[in-house]
Image: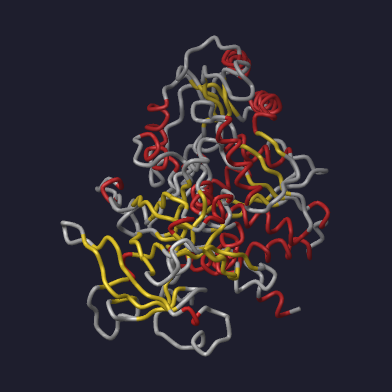
Amino acid sequence: MEEEKKSLNFIEQIIEDDLAKGFPKDRLRFRFPPEPNGYLHVGHTKAICINFGLGEKYGAPVNLRFDDTNPEKEEQEFVDSIKKDVEWLGFKYDKELYASDYFEQLYIWAVQMIKNGKAYVDEQSSEEITAQRKNPFEDGIESPYRNRPVEESLDLFERMKNGEFEEGSMSLRAKIDMTSPNMNMRDPVMYRILRRPHHRTGEKWKIYPMYDWAHGESDYIEQISHSLCSLEFENHRPLYDWYLDQVYEESKVRNKQREFARMNVSYMITSKRKLQRLVAEKAVTGWDDPRMPTISGMRRLGFTPKSIRNFIDRVGVAKRENLIDIQLLEFFVREDLNKVSTRVMAVVDPVKLVIENYPENAEEWLETENNPEDENAGTREIPFSRELYIEREDFKEEAGNKFFRLKLGGEVRLKSAYIIKAERIDKDENGEITTIYATYDPKSKSGSGTEESLRKVKGTLHWVSAKHALPVEVRIYDRLFTTPQPDAEKETDFMEFMNPESLKIVQGFAEPSLKNAEVGKPYQFQRIGYFTKDPDSTHEKLVFNRTVTLKDSYKPE
């Protein structure tokens, strides 16, 4: 039991302590509460895995609640994408809920707070309110409207709701403490006037609750036992608790906010505002561009749910922020793809290879494994013929002893096929090699059991039969930024660190089995890397994205 306790992260320890003190296990409930103002990114995967992971650990329900209190930035598109991302990661939520479901109740509670002398309508501008708050080391200045009669605030608040006033002309503020060193407690705004249609409630509301007011009370309405959020909300916790004090009933669960460190990954940014800018300025093709740190971008690039969840497990739950090396994420991606990806032949920079002593019209189908890491993956047949494509970098006219691929007069084995020897080449007017001519040893066929088939040569090349080759567009993706922390320098625009080599598009050839490739299914292009079919593919044009290279020197500590 002691060993088990040592392995708990600090959030699990909090829950275990609450259970030990008598909190009923059947009243545990968690939630993941994104704002639908953009696509989820790599940082959100941590919050998703923490909340849903706790749900799985304790057999407790987890709500997916959209904190949709800002109609200026929220859209149904973002709601749909968030649901898809959570489900893709392999999690099931108990209920799909919205803060807007509670607008009526939040309004009723706000009215009661005015009646209790805990809130008032302020007619100052947001700039004036900010100026009066001062700073943590200096007492704030009370609003001239702070002590206005309750009936007057009630009347104005109702008229705000009815749309009688212009945006910015007034707001509802909580009456707390203008001398508090915590700036969040200096009479925070609870409601502002926004004459904007909402993606769910339409034109019904002319006032909208602020995040701090709506968020904690939504947790309370849903009876969330542990409200888990990132560390920047730590100094909002006193306000979270104060608001809860205004509505709490003894018979209900008293929800508890606790904070964990955000996850920052090198070469990625997780500011929605900056991600929106990348999309708006067309620096990327959209939110799901494979170079984006969004979950939809990582999915399109070919990352697997399991690799992301394994990565989050390794990173763990911490109280202090740090920068996680992107190579750790790529390590887990490779580790999973190695187990599940189908091995195929593809050539991304082709040069023609003609086997002159192979019969001109002959072809044969050679058996090859789909995945040697998976004994249940089976085998398939690939076509072999006189004319093939190989990688241009796999041939050199002249090379030293440390070059183990094909060179004039040298031998290599064609994977799953025969040993060949390069005899001569053709070049174009620019001196570029157009065709390599070779001969093959007919008795050296892989797996045939002949003495020649067992003969060792140092190099093995992948290839594609020219007669059967499928033309494919191959998108070679690299990191979107050239520096590990592109938004760390406040004086420098993060866009200046964009990598001009983040996408390279080449035309290649692949074996015919990829004609029926599924979007999102992982493939290993042998000796090249891991790839997946892109949704841009059509019947006439196949597009594959490189997920990661085959190997990396990174070793996770």
Give how far across and how far down residue 195 sits, in percent: 52, 17
Closer to us: 90 or 535? 535
Residue 25 picture quarter: bottom right
Q: How is the image coloured?
A: secondary structure
Q: Residue at x 65, y 29 (%)?
A: 100
How many dots with numbers? 0
| Residue 280 in the image: above or below residue 171 | below
Give how far across and how far down residue 408 sits, in percent: 27, 77
Is residue 143 visible to us here?
A: yes
Q: Quadrant of the N terminus?
A: bottom right
Report whether 346 appears left or right of 353.
Answer: right
Give how far across and how far down residue 152 sits, in percent: 59, 14
Q: Residue at x 45, y 88 (%)?
A: 456
Report whether 479 appears left or right of 315.
Answer: left
Is residue 321 visible to us here?
A: no
Closer to us: 430 or 15? 430
Closer to us: 397 or 286? 397
Residue 461 picture quarter: bottom left
Report whether 283 appears left or right of 523.
Answer: left
